């Protein structure tokens, strides 16, 4: 497949080269380079193609390769890597080809953007379009480089922390592809340079304005709104670029990539992220319903085609709203005509505190092992279906012998004793006799993630209550998120946290809960250099009501080197790249 993609890119380069007579049909409708220079829609397609390869375009559900979930789909690729098949030859986390393809499309677009007649009748509007498209291109390229670095950066066989190849021009020759892997720092610098370039061109946000934003003085406001107004929302903006910069700073500060434990990297991550959050009001910017972003009221509020054209408070960047029932068909329990695919683990259930905020292992939690789902953090019932809870106003029993929903009763039944509830809408019906769809969206960046990013970095930089130049602390953030979740106030457990180590444990746990099933756990464990081999656990509840906990699946990862993903084997063979240590 990788060889095919290399040939595809080469063929594309030849296709775009007007000197190649073999690809210049005279009497039919094949597209050539000439159309790019004449047809703005066709030219913009180069840039839009790069949007299609963003890794967060859909939820990956790679939690089934962690201690947070398993799946009843025995052919699932993430299940396979969790069970020991992860390699440079089989890697469902491989984005090498797709992300680099997107980067090369961006580079091709940048090479022609100045020549395309975006608005031939109005030079001022044409210049604004060029400005917008250049900014988008650099921001999008930075984001794709970031994901490549996260998924494929690591300590190489040579002992050096390495990044991923940097392609800043359209590449169509083998020699350019064979350029050595840069250092991690060089890759970081390349991403930050793209973000800095993007910010020269882009406004912080898109949308119609009544006064021109800074940097656009002298433009006609009608022209500005035509190019940067409501029509452009959900395209990559200056604020999106800053969020990628914040993500990158956190990655660089994390233990897997901050090998010398450089405190300045944590301070940098905290400051960059804190500045971004200050722009939305700091702690006051936390959306009271942000943890319920997928439910009807929040989806309706996010619909920018109606009302005030503003997204809901939680969303920094998301995909467009669409209408279907795919998530529910995959994940509803069998009695509700679903396939029950994603099964949360006992590990994750045990991570939810009791309603007073104490971990269930703490005597002050008042946790009752005989009634394990009572008096728990409200997020447990919001995100997970457990024995005796309701979904679509229907009691779901997962105990042994309780019918189709019971543990391992059918191929589509739960393997852990739990079903997924987060991301699903209960007003969807997948009964084939009376199906109904509802609106959904997929998220690229939620503000909750950024608050948690800040809390993590601020705690490492300044301790639980330090705020640097930002004005609010890690403890302030966690207090706001736990209060929003419904933890009883005052939050005595949080008040008892005074050390950086204890706060780190709490922040990581809150991140686990708030961002579950959104594609974070797999890479969080790795950037933290945490244990990757914690078995995925479940519970069997027998007829007498006894809870029997068991290991559902082992996790066959090598903790010596699998904190970094591999470079695809075919890229090593073709171009001689240094492989990440341990993957040979």
Image (tube, helix red, strand yellow):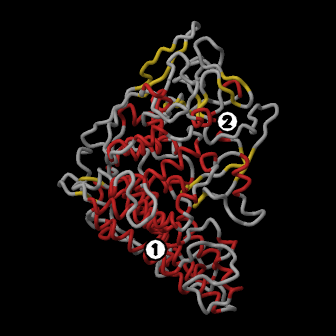
Residue 67 drawn at (x, y percent): 43, 33
Residue drawn at x 58%, y 27% is: 375
Q: Secondary structure at mark 1?
A: helix
Q: Quadrant of the C terminus?
A: top left
Label 1: few (<14), some (14–19) or many (≥20) C-alpha neighbours in 10 Å: many
Task: Using the image as rendered, state which of residue 466 and residue 50 is in the foreground.
Answer: 466
Left/right placement of residue 177 relative to residue 216 reads: left
Task: Name the disc covering residue 107, or none.
Answer: 1
Residue 149 sits in quarter? bottom left
Q: Farthest residue in the right direction? A: 434
Left/right placement of residue 332 relative to residue 360 reads: right
Task: Using the image as rendered, state which of residue 552 and residue 31 is in the foreground.
Answer: 552
Residue 334 drawn at (x, y percent): 66, 25
Left/right placement of residue 215 relative to residue 524 reads: right
Residue 574 drawn at (x, y percent): 30, 57
Task: Using the image as rendered, state which of residue 95 and residue 33 is in the foreground.
Answer: 95
Q: Provide the residue designation for mark 2.
A: 329
Q: Is residue 149 above or below residue 332?
A: below
Q: Is residue 433 above or below residue 18?
A: above
Residue 513 in sight from this viewpoint:
yes
Residue drawn at x 39%, y 42% is: 497
Label 2: few (<14), some (14–19) or many (≥20) C-alpha neighbours in 10 Å: many
């Amino acid at each position: 497949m990788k060889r095919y993609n290399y040939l595809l890119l080469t063929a594309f380069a030849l296709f775009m080269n007007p000197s190649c007579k073999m690809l210049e049909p005279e009497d039919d409708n094949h597209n050539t380079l000439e159309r790019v220079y004449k047809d703005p829609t066709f030219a913009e397609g180069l840039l839009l193609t790069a949007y299609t390869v963003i890794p967060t375009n859909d939820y990956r559900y790679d939690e089934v390769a962690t201690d947070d979930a398993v799946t009843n789909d025995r052919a699932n690729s993430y299940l396979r890597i969790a069970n020991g098949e992860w390699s440079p030859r089989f890697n469902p986390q491989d984005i090498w080809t797709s992300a680099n393809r997107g980067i090369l499309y961006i580079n091709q677009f940048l090479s022609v953007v100045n020549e395309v007649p975006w608005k031939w009748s109005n030079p001022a509007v044409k210049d604004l379009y060029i400005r917008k498209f250049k900014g988008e291109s650099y921001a999008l390229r930075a984001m794709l480089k970031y994901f490549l670095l996260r998924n494929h950066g690591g300590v190489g066989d040579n002992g050096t922390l390495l990044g991923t190849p940097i392609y800043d021009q359209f590449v169509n020759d083998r020699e350019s592809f064979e350029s050595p892997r840069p250092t991690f720092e060089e890759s970081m610098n390349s991403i930050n340079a793209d973000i800095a370039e993007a910010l020269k061109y882009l406004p912080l946000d898109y949308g119609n304005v009544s006064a021109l934003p800074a940097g656009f003085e002298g433009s006609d406001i009608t022209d500005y709104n035509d190019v940067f107004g409501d029509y452009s929302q959900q395209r990559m903006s200056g604020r999106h670029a800053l969020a990628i910069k914040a993500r990158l700073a956190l990655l660089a500060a994390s233990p897997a990539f901050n090998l010398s434990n450089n405190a300045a990297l944590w301070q940098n991550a905290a400051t960059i992220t804190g500045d971004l959050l200050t722009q939305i009001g700091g702690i006051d910017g936390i959306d009271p319903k942000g943890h319920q972003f997928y439910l009807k009221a929040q989806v309706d509020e996010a619909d920018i085609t109606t009302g005030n054209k503003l997204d809901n408070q939680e969303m920094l960047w998301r995909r467009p709203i669409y209408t279907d029932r795919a998530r529910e068909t995959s994940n509803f329990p069998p009695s509700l005509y679903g396939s029950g695919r994603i099964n949360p683990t006992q590990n994750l259930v045990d991570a939810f505190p009791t309603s007073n905020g104490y971990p269930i292992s703490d005597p002050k939690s008042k946790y009752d092992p005989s009634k394990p789902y009572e008096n728990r953090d409200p997020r447990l019932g919001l995100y997970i279906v457990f024995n005796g809870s309701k979904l679509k106003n229907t009691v779901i029993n997962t105990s042994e012998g309780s019918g189709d929903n019971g543990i391992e009763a059918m191929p589509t039944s739960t393997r852990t004793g739990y079903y997924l509830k987060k991301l699903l809408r209960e007003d969807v019906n997948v009964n084939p006799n009376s199906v109904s769809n509802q609106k959904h969206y997929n998220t690229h960046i939620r503000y909750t993630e950024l608050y948690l990013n800040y809390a993590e970095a601020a705690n490492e930089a300044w301790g639980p209550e330090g705020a640097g130049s930002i004005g609010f602390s890690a403890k302030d953030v966690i207090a706001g998120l736990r209060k929003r979740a419904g933890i009883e106030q005052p939050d005595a457990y949080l008040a008892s946290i005074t050390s950086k180590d204890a706060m780190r444990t709490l922040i990581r746990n809150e991140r686990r809960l708030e961002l579950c099933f959104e594609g974070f756990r797999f890479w969080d464990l790795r950037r933290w250099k945490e244990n990757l081999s914690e078995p995925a656990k479940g519970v069997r509840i027998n007829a007498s009501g006894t809870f029997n906990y068991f290991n559902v699946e082992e996790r066959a990862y090598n903790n010596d080197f699998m904190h970094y993903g591999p470079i695809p084997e075919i890229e090593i063979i073709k171009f001689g790249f240094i492989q990440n240590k341990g993957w040979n």
